[in-house]
Image (cartoon, rainbow, N blue to C red):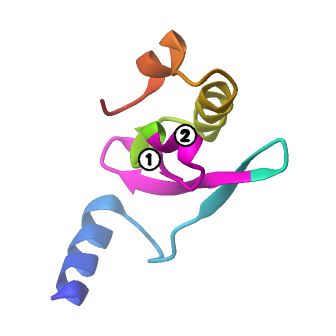
């Protein structure tokens, strides 16, 4: 079943590999989470997986760029709330 889904997704998205690329997000040397590059029908996006409880509001959120993920995580970690810009950049509520 997994193999069928993978082949179908690969055909639709033109994905060459099943390997996903991930990027560590650290804030002032503290491991805050991971951004996972995810191809989609609409282009590339990044899904954020939060590790630090102070930024768990961002867990499983989708972002258009790696830099947008980093900015939002840093702001939330520093202030305790999402910035208006981050809310507008985020791809899912």
Q: Is residue 29 inside the magenta stretch?
A: no
Q: Name the residue under label 1.
A: 59
Q: Quadrant of the N terminus?
A: bottom left
The answer to whether 10 is drawn above or below residue 4 in the figure is above
Give residue 57's quadrant in the image: top left
Using residue 79 as the reference point, say whether residue 18 is left or right of it: left
Q: Main secondary structure of the magenta part?
A: strand
Camera-nearest label, 1 or 2 = 2
Residue 37 picture location, percent across and down: 52, 55
Residue drawn 41% across and 41% down? Answer: 62
Viewer-closest of 91 and 56: 56
Residue drawn 58% across and 37% down? Answer: 69
Residue 2 picture location, percent across and down: 22, 85
Q: Quadrant of the C terminus?
A: top left
The answer to whether 44 is drawn above or below residue 10 in the figure is above
**Mark 2 closeness class: few <14, some 14–19, many ≥20 residues within 10 Å:** many
Give residue 77's quadrant in the image: top right
Q: Do the residues labelled 1 and 2 touch (CB within 8 Å)?
A: yes
Q: Give the range drawn in magenta.
A: 31-56
**Mark 1 secondary-structure assignment:** loop
**Label 1 vs label 2: CA separation?**
7 Å
Q: Name the residue under label 2.
A: 55
- Kindly give the residue lying farthest to the right in the view shown: 29
The answer to whether 9 is drawn above or below residue 44 in the figure is below
Q: Is residue 45 inside the magenta stretch?
A: yes
Residue drawn 18% across and 84% down? Answer: 4
């Amino acid at each position: 079943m997994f193999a069928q889904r993978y082949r179908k997704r690969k055909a639709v998205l033109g994905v060459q590999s099943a390997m996903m690329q991930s990027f560590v997000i650290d804030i002032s040397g503290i491991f805050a989470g991971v951004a996972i590059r995810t191809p989609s029908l609409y282009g590339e996006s990044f899904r954020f997986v939060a590790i630090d409880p102070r930024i768990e509001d961002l867990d499983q959120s989708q972002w258009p760029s790696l830099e947008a993920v980093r900015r939002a995580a840093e702001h939330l970690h520093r202030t305790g709330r999402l910035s208006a810009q981050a809310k507008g950049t985020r791809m899912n509520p």
